[in-house]
Amino acid sequence: MRDQPASWGVRVHAVWKCLRVLAHIVSGLITLAWVFPKLTESQKEERIQAWAQLMLARLAIKLVVNGSPPEHGPMMLASNHISWLDIVVLHAARHCRFVSKAELRHWPLIGTLAAGAGTLFIERESRRDALRVVHHMAERLSAGDILAIFPEGTTSNGVDLLPFHANLFQAAITANAPVLPVALRFEDAATAQFSLAPCYIDDDTLLGSIWRSLTAPPLCAVVTFGEAQSFKGRDRRTWSADIRQAVADLRAL
């Protein structure tokens, strides 16, 4: 079960964590406004990764990284999608530029941070906007960026893996950039059992999912990097299916 009534002590501790998280978000907004304009791109990447790692610490979430994060681009990361936490977790494991749904831009505080971290926003229902974003993605890959996508297009419960949408893989084909499969998993830190606490699916609200994560026992966020694949003449649908299988294999490990 995802929803369990929290004790009074757990609720008090969750409120304390929430206050620390809000303070950390505010510090991130201040950094974006006053510090980022003076930094180089590599310095910005280091700041974003350090900020994400500290955010997980504020949430009492331990980061576990398996495999080797890419040292440099061009590279596209293709990951399963579970939670509002996924972007923070992947940033903590390896800084990258995300491609995310346009709704994220309008989330209070989080949208501003995502935009400041260089996220590319896409209107999922608009074919024209998808073509625009794919073109922009190809440009960024050609410039040597590391991009991250969630090909499922929405969050799942982390147990099942949804079909992958192939459209965004066209950017990697156009830029002749490899794709690296990545698997995400949330676990109970004490038992290593799969945790549904951070899920953001079905009738979940963002605030409800955040509160459930705050009141859950300490968690581990496990990021497993696979082996990069070049498209080698495959069309985007075939390549997408192959990457999905690779992600499924990583999750099975």
Image (spheres, rainbow, N blue to C red):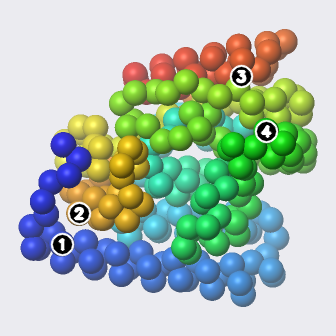
| Residue hosting label 4 | 127
* Residue 22 visible, this orientation: yes
Amino acid bearing label 3: Gln
| Residue hosting label 1 | 11
Q: Is residue 17 above or below residue 62?
A: below
Task: Check residue 229 in the rendering and tell me which mark sits there, or answer none.
Answer: 3
Distance CA(mark 2)–CA(mark 1): 6 Å
Amino acid bearing label 2: Thr
Q: Position of residue 93 (x, y in %)?
A: 55, 50
Distance CA(mark 4)–CA(mark 2): 40 Å
Q: Are marks 4 and 2 in contact (CB under 8 Å)?
A: no
* Residue 73 visible, this orientation: no
| Residue hosting label 2 | 215
Look at discs 3 and 4 and give the one toward the viewer.
Answer: 4
- Name the one closer to the observer, 24 or 3: 3
Q: Are marks 3 and 4 in contact (CB under 8 Å)?
A: no
Q: Is residue 36 left or right of residue 63?
A: right
Give the class, few, some or many, for how many residues have Cα within 10 Å of label 4's Cα (few <14, many ≥20): few
Amino acid bearing label 1: Arg
**Which element type, helix, strand or loop, lies under badge 2?**
helix
Give the number of marks. 4
Look at discs 1 and 4 and give the one toward the viewer.
Answer: 4
Amino acid bearing label 4: Arg
Earlier residue among tags 3 and 1 = 1
Distance CA(mark 1)–CA(mark 4): 44 Å
Give the class, few, some or many, for how many residues have Cα within 10 Å of label 2's Cα (few <14, many ≥20): many
In the picture, which quadrant includes the N terminus?
A: top left
Distance CA(mark 3)–CA(mark 2): 39 Å
